[in-house]
Structures are given as C-alpha cells and as structure tokens.
Amino acid sequence: MKKHLTRSEAAKRKKTNLVTALLLAFLMISSIAGYMSNRNSLNVVRYNNFVFRQEQDSYGNLRWYSKIDGKEFVFDYNPKLLENINVSPVIRDRILSSNYVILTFEPSDRFTMNYFDRARYDFGSVLYTKGINVASAIANTSEDYNLTIMTCDNSTQQIPVIYMFKGNKTEIRMEGDCIILECSENYEILALKDRLLYSILGVMK
C-alpha cells in the first residue's frame, strides 16, 4: 500500500531532489571545464619568475604563452629548451639601443620560407613593444617577395641588420655590425628567434 507523504515530507523530499540535481549539474560542469582546461593548457613551465603555458593557437599549433611586463607574448619554445644557445649581451644591447632594425633573409623554397615568415612576424611584434621599428628585406632577388635587397653590408651601428639564413650550423653570432641567425634545419630558425627574443625581453641573459 502506497504511503501518502505529508506536505512537510513532500517539501523536504523536493528540496533534497533539487539539491542533488544541482550537485550533479555542478559536477558535470566542473568535469567539462577541467577537460577543456587540460586540453587547451597542456603544460606549464616556470623560468626565472616567468610562467609559460603551452596551448594550442587558433591554427592548432602548440605554442608557449607568457605575460611579460604586463604584455602577452607567444613563442615556439619554452626557455628551458634553449639554454644551450648562446647570445652575446653585445647583440642584445645593440638591438635595444636602436630605434630601427632591418630584418633580412635568404629566400628559398616555400616550405622553408613558412618558418622564416613566422620568425619575421614574431620579431616585428616583440620589437614593436620595445619601441623598435622593423623593416623587412631580402638578401637576394625573389619572385615571391617584393622587398628591398639588403645584406650585412648595409648594417650600421645605428641601424643593425638581422640576417637569417639556412646554412651548416645553428647559432646566433655577430659579424661587424650584422647580427646573424644561421640554422641548419628549417624549424631551428624558430628556436633562434625565441632565444634572441628571450634575451631582449629579459627572460634569459
């Protein structure tokens, strides 16, 4: 025989069911939020009081994001992975003391240029926040780029040239007034770009 509930018992049961439903909804939302957070923020690295989080960009590429001096920057490598690449303080100081920098590169096949174009974009974005204007150029004639031809011969103390090209080794060096980024593999230009930018931003020496 079915027992009839009093008004107070029915109200109490209704309240209990409501609390249970709200708790289940909260747990479901928390689980979804946790999943989305883990999917979008895959790793966190701390380096010299800076926090870097690895996330997917709008193109699905994994990149490293960090807020430096109140501004959000994005990199391809976290600084811990670049400690074996040396950057002379003279190179950093030369760039920071200039109001204008020429960024030139050796044009090659389209696949290689995708890496160099990304490096050029990131250089321009970061140096702009430091009050440094960047002009893009090419070292040789190319049908793909309508840019002025500039080489290390055009570099001066007031307006340094940053010259990027694919060669036989991977390093950052200075020859005269020219700052050279030479990579032996296409993707390594992104590592050299990040290492130099970390130095300019004060993340690394």
Image (cartoon, rainbow, N blue to C red):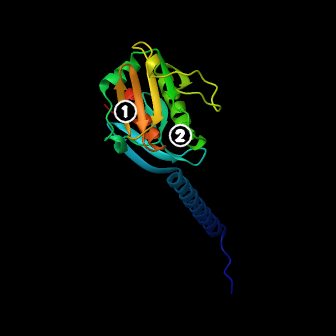
Residue shown at 42%/32% (left/top)? 181
| Vertical order, 154 against 9 (above or below) | above
Q: Quadrant of residue 12?
A: bottom right
Mark 1 Cα within 10 Å, few/some/many (few <14, many 20+)? many
Given the image, on which type of amino acid does mark 1 rest?
Answer: Ile
Res. 132 in view = no
Instruction: Give coordinates of residue 106: x percent, y percent.
Output: 52, 32
Q: Residue 205, how many percent across, how many down?
A: 31, 31
- The reply, left or right, for residue 43 in relation to residue 147 is left
Between 141 and 117, the one nearer to me in the picture: 141
Identify the residue at image location x=51%, y=34%: 119
Residue corresponding to mark 2: 115
Q: Nearer the viewer, residue 172 or 32?
A: 172
Tell me the CA gap for discs 1 and 2.
17 Å
The answer to which quarter of the image holds residue 48 is top left
Tag 2's secondary structure?
helix
Please give the name of the residue rendered at 45% of the width and 44% of the height, measured from the top-left corner: 185
Image mark for residue 172: 1
Q: Residue at x 65, y 68 (%)?
A: 10
For badge 2, the amino acid type reads Tyr
- The secondary structure type at the circle numbered 1 is strand
